[in-house]
């Protein structure tokens, strides 16, 4: 990656920073604060290099007026998103999911429909599939696990299901032994039986028309995604989740996220293991 301070590297002016940041915000809700200008500059440098552009201005005109802009936005999402994730993240919440939410839903309905919204490279939905398999839930009812992300690169990796050690940082060893096979030095592949339980797709959380096609969900996990959004995009996304959930459906956000500053129709629900939002 070029060092923006190096001679010859492009520099992002304040004005172009604001134009690019507003375009990104409008399209996908991700908000780069003024203090994150250098982060955005570094990330978009990669696209300038790939396209052999010599200025951010050229890039801005490309994504604003060029017929190939839509394709380019897909590449841009890959570089501007933060895809940090790992298996068995936020264990108490997962315990609430598997020990309290799943039995409750399956006692009332023949089918459980779960959506991992902003699944990155797949560790989150595969964790759900492993937990559901281990608990015997697949034998107790129909289960649909949908997983989506805006980044095409992340979704491609998720579909492949091949992971390095850092994805296993909080994974109890018995899961690796049971649900993975070695795929080369330092690499583990999710076994097909787990892989086939998850349907992956590319979806922008602001694209309500396409999201509508998911139908009605019982549980939505959207963890560590809307922390990157501005308040307006957060509000719209939360409303969209409310509309997509059936009555009594659950919304699981990341632990550092809360709906406290939003007027929301969700109610906070206390489980033994954790607190989650409920429709
Ligand atoms: C930090 S990862 C979180 C992954 C996982 N949910 C977890 O908690 O480990 C955030 C993900 O949100 C995705 N994302 C950001 N904005 C999005 C949008 N508008 N629509 C869909 N996904 C988005 C990013 O591509 C990224 O993979």
Image (cartoon, rainbow, N blue to C red):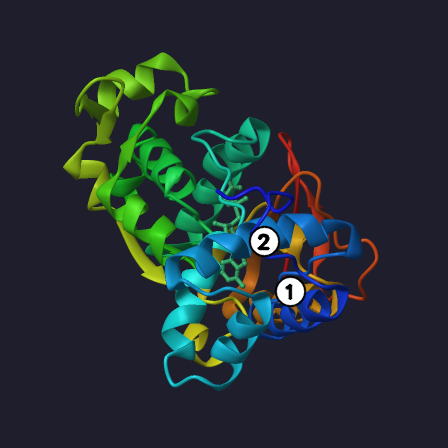
Alpha carbon separation for disc pair 1 and 2: 9 Å
Q: Residue furthest front?
A: 7
* Left or right: 174, with 22 as reference point: left
Residue closer to the observer: 14 or 72: 14
Percent of width and height locating residue 254: 62, 42
Q: Quadrant of residue 226?
A: bottom right
Query: Is residue 220 visible to us here?
Result: no
Residue, x 75% and y 56% (percent of image)?
33
Q: What percent of the width, then of the height, locates residue 118?
A: 48, 53
The verdict on label 2 being within 8 Å of ligand 1 is no
The crowding category of the residue bearing disc 2, from other C-alpha atoms within 10 Å (few below 14, some 14 to 19, many at least 20), is many
Which residue is drawn at the image coordinates 62% and 54% (left, top)? Answer: 40
Circle 2: element type = strand
Q: Position of residue 173 (x, y in %)?
A: 35, 13
Task: Answer few, some or many: residues within 10 Å of disc 1's Cα (few below 14, many 20 plus, some between 14 and 19).
Answer: many
Residue drawn at x 17%, y 25% is 183
Q: Quadrant of residue 229?
A: bottom right
Label 2, on which residue? 251
Would the CB of label 1 be found within 8 Å of ligand 1? no
Observer able to see residue 14? yes
Which residue is found at the position 30% from the left and 45% from the top?
157
**Does 223 sit above or below residue 189?**
below
Closer to the chain start, of discs 1 and 2, is 1
Identify the element where label 1 is drawn: helix
The reply to whether discs 1 and 2 touch (Cβ–Cβ < 8 Å) is yes
Q: Quadrant of the C terminus?
A: bottom right
In this picture, residue 119 sits left or right of residue 265 = left
* Residue hosting label 1: 238
């Amino acid at each position: 990656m070029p060092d923006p301070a190096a001679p010859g590297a492009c520099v992002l002016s304040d004005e172009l920073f604001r134009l690019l940041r507003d375009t990104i915000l409008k399209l996908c809700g991700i908000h780069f604060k003024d203090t994150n200008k250098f982060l955005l500059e570094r990330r978009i440098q990669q696209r300038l290099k790939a396209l052999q552009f010599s200025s951010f201005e050229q890039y801005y005109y490309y994504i604003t007026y060029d017929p190939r802009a839509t394709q380019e936005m897909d590449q841009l999402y890959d570089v501007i998103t933060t895809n940090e994730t790992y298996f068995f993240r936020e264990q108490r919440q997962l315990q609430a999911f598997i020990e309290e939410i799943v039995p409750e839903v399956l006692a009332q309905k023949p089918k459980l429909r779960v959506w991992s919204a902003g699944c990155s490279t797949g560790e989150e939905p595969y964790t759900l599939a492993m937990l559901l398999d281990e608990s015997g839930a697949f034998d107790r009812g129909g289960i649909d696990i949908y997983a989506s992300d805006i980044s095409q690169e992340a979704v491609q990796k998720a579909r492949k299901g091949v992971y390095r050690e850092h994805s296993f940082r909080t994974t109890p060893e018995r899961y690796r032994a049971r649900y993975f096979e070695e795929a080369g030095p330092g690499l583990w592949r999710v076994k097909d039986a787990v892989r086939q339980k998850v349907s992956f797709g590319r979806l922008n959380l602001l694209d309500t028309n396409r999201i509508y096609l998911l139908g009605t969900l019982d549980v939505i996990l959207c963890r560590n995604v809307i922390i990157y959004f501005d308040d307006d995009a957060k509000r719209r996304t939360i409303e969209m989740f409310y509309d997509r959930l059936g009555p009594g459906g659950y919304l699981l956000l990341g632990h550092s996220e809360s709906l406290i500053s939003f007027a929301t129709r969700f109610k906070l629900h206390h489980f033994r293991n954790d607190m989650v939002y409920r429709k």
